[in-house]
Image: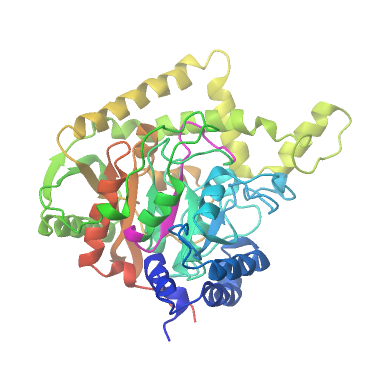
C-alpha cells in the first residue's frame, strides 16, 4: 500500500476519483502522520482533527457530484495569519493568542467551495516577519530534512508540513519571499501569485502593498489546482484585480520550445554558496535542453532592493500593527493610564523582531524623515519595477536562485538581523515589483534542498507553472522525501 502521506495532490485526486481511496482514509493517515512527526517538526499551532474528519466524511458522501471542485476531499493546512471562522488565529504572536475570528478569509471560502479540508493552522514567524520561523512566539519549527536546521520563513510551518508529509498542500503568504524561500529550503514547490491575483481579505496584514497569499505543495501541477481554487476578483479587497482566471492545469503542456528565459546576473550574489549556484545553473541548463532559449539579462536596480524593502515593509507594518493595543484585540496588561496600558501590552506581547520593525517603520514615517526615507524608497521601488518591465520586453520569464544558502542551523542568525534579512535578497525584488514567482526543487547541496526560482510577467502564472511542470516531468527532485521515521 502506498504511503498516503507521500502522495501529491494530483495523485491523491486521481485515486479519489477512481474510487481507490477515500477522503476519510487519507485524512486519518495524515492526522496519524501529524501525531507521529509533530513532536519533532513542530509545524502546527492548532490541529482541527474533528473538523477535518467531518469534512472528509461529507466529501466522500458527495463524491461524483457534478459540482465538485478541483480539491474535493483533499486535506490542506493553513498558515496562521489567515482568518478561519471559529478557529484560533494567532499570527504566531502572544498579542493574538486567544483571537478567534468571526469570519473566514476569502481564500478559506474558496477552498471550502473547492471541496478542500482543513487539518489545522501552521506556525510562522510572528506577523510573518522573519526568514526562519524562529520569531514565532510559540515554537521553532524544524526542517524535516535536518531537524537541527530552520525550515525558512515566514511560512516555515507551511513548508515543513508538506515536506514532512503532514498535509498534501498548504497556504502560505509572501511579503518578501515567505513562500518561496521556505519552499526552497524544504525541497517543495511554492508560488507567490501576482499582487492582486488572490484576495487578501481576511489576511492579517503585515505590508499591505507587498503581501500575497499563495499555495505550497510538492509539484507545479499541484499548485495549478490550488491556484485555480484561490484566484479571482474579490470586491471586498480593493487591490484585487478584476481579470479572468485562466485554466492553469490546461497550460501544463510539457512543452518549452521557443520560451525565452532570462538569467539576471545580479541574482547570483556575492556570498552565494557554491552548491546553491551549481544546482541553480544546472537547472537552467535543463530548461535549455527542454527547448527554452536562455538569454542573459540585467536588472541593475536589484542592488537597492534590500534597503528599499526594509523601509517600505516596516513602514507599512508600523501602520498595520497599530491596531493591536490590547483594547480591541488580545490580552491586556494593567497600567495606571490608558497609555501605560497600551505601552505595556505592546511591549510585552510583541516579540523582538516585530518591535524592531515597528520602530524602523515609525522612524521612516516620522516628520522630517518621511521624504528622506519612505518617499525615496517608493521612488526606487518604481525603478526596480521598471527593471522587470524592461526585461520582459526581451524574455518571457526569468530564472534565478531562490536563497543564497541552504537551510542554516537553528540559532545561527537570531542575533544578527542583517544576516537574517540577507536570506531574502533573491526574493524580495519580486514583491516590490508585484510580479509572480514560482519555486521548484532543483537539487541538493550538503544533503539539503535547493530551489530554482522562476519569475514571470504580471498575471502570467500560467507560463511559470508550465515551465515548472515541464522541468518536473524531466527531473525527480520533487519525488524525494525526507526520512522522519
Q: Residue at x 28, y 44 (%)?
A: 455
Q: Nearer the viewer, residue 208 or 48?
A: 48
Residue appearing at x 43%, y 56% in the figure: 216
Q: Residue lying at the far right in this picture: please name it.
A: 336
Query: Which contiguous range is marked in magenta?
Result: 204-221
Q: Residue at 75% of width from left, 50% of height from top?
A: 98
* Residue nearer the viewer, 12 or 282: 12
* Residue 73 place in picture, x, y as percent: 51, 66
In this rendering, position of residue 151 left or right of residue 262: right
Residue at (82%, 30%) from the top-left corner?
340
Instruction: State the image coordinates of residue 278 (x, y, percent, origin top left).
Output: 21, 59
Residue 12 to residue 307: above or below: below
Q: How is the image coloured?
A: rainbow
Instruction: Name the residue nearer the viewer: 417 or 143.
Output: 143
Residue 28 can be seen in this image: yes
Q: Magenta segment: does it hold 213?
A: yes
Amino acid at each position: 500500500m502506498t504511503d498516503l502521506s507521500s502522495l501529491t495532490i494530483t495523485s491523491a485526486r486521481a485515486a479519489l476519483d477512481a474510487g481507490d481511496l477515500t477522503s476519510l482514509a487519507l485524512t486519518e493517515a495524515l492526522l496519524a502522520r501529524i501525531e507521529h512527526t509533530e513532536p519533532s517538526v513542530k509545524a502546527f499551532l492548532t490541529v482541527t482533527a474533528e473538523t477535518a474528519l467531518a469534512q472528509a466524511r461529507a466529501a466522500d458522501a458527495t463524491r461524483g457530484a457534478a459540482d465538485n471542485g478541483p480539491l474535493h476531499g483533499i486535506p490542506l493546512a493553513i498558515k496562521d495569519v489567515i482568518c478561519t471562522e471559529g478557529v484560533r488565529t494567532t499570527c504566531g504572536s502572544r498579542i493574538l493568542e486567544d483571537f478567534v475570528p468571526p469570519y473566514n478569509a476569502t481564500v478559506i471560502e474558496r477552498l471550502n467551495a473547492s471541496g478542500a479540508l482543513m487539518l489545522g493552522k501552521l506556525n510562522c514567524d510572528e506577523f510573518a516577519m522573519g526568514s526562519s520561523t524562529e520569531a514565532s512566539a510559540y515554537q521553532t519549527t524544524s526542517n524535516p530534512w535536518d531537524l537541527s536546521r530552520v525550515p525558512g520563513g515566514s511560512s516555515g510551518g507551511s513548508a515543513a508540513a508538506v515536506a514532512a508529509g503532514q498535509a498534501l498542500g498548504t497556504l502560505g503568504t509572501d511579503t518578501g519571499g515567505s513562500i518561496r524561500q521556505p519552499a526552497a529550503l524544504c525541497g517543495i514547490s511554492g508560488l507567490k501569485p501576482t499582487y492582486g491575483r488572490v484576495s487578501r481579505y481576511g489576511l492579517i496584514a503585515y505590508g499591505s502593498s507587498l503581501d500575497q497569499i499563495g499555495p505550497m505543495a510538492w509539484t507545479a501541477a499541484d499548485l495549478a489546482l490550488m491556484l485555480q481554487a484561490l484566484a479571482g476578483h474579490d470586491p471586498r479587497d480593493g487591490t484585487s484585480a478584476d481579470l479572468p482566471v485562466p485554466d492553469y492545469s490546461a497550460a501544463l503542456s510539457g512543452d518549452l520550445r521557443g520560451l525565452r528565459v532570462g538569467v539576471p546576473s545580479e541574482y547570483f550574489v556575492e556570498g552565494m554558496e557554491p552548491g546553491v549556484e551549481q544546482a541553480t545553473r544546472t537547472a537552467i541548463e535543463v530548461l535549455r535542453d527542454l527547448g527554452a532559449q536562455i538569454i542573459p539579462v540585467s536588472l541593475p536596480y536589484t542592488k537597492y532592493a534590500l534597503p528599499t524593502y526594509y523601509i517600505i515593509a516596516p513602514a507599512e507594518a508600523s501602520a498595520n500593527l497599530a491596531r493591536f493595543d490590547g483594547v480591541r484585540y488580545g490580552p491586556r496588561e494593567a497600567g495606571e493610564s490608558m497609555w501605560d496600558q497600551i505601552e505595556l501590552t505592546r511591549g510585552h506581547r510583541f516579540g523582538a523582531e516585530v518591535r524592531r520593525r515597528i520602530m524602523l517603520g515609525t522612524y521612516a514615517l516620522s516628520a522630517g524623515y518621511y521624504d528622506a526615507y519612505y518617499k525615496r524608497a517608493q521612488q526606487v521601488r518604481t525603478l526596480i519595477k521598471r527593471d522587470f518591465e524592461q526585461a520582459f520586453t526581451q524574455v518571457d520569464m526569468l530564472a534565478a536562485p531562490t536563497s543564497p544558502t541552504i537551510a542554516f542551523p537553528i540559532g545561527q542568525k537570531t542575533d544578527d538581523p542583517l544576516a537574517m534579512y540577507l536570506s531574502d535578497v533573491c526574493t524580495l525584488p519580486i514583491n516590490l515589483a508585484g510580479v509572480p514567482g514560482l519555486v521548484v526543487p532543483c537539487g541538493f547541496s550538503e544533503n539539503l534542498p535547493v530551489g530554482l526560482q522562476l519569475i514571470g510577467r504580471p498575471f502570467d502564472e500560467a507560463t511559470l507553472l508550465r515551465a515548472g511542470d515541464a522541468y518536473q516531468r524531466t527531473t525527480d527532485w520533487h519525488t524525494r522525501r525526507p526520512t522522519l521515521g
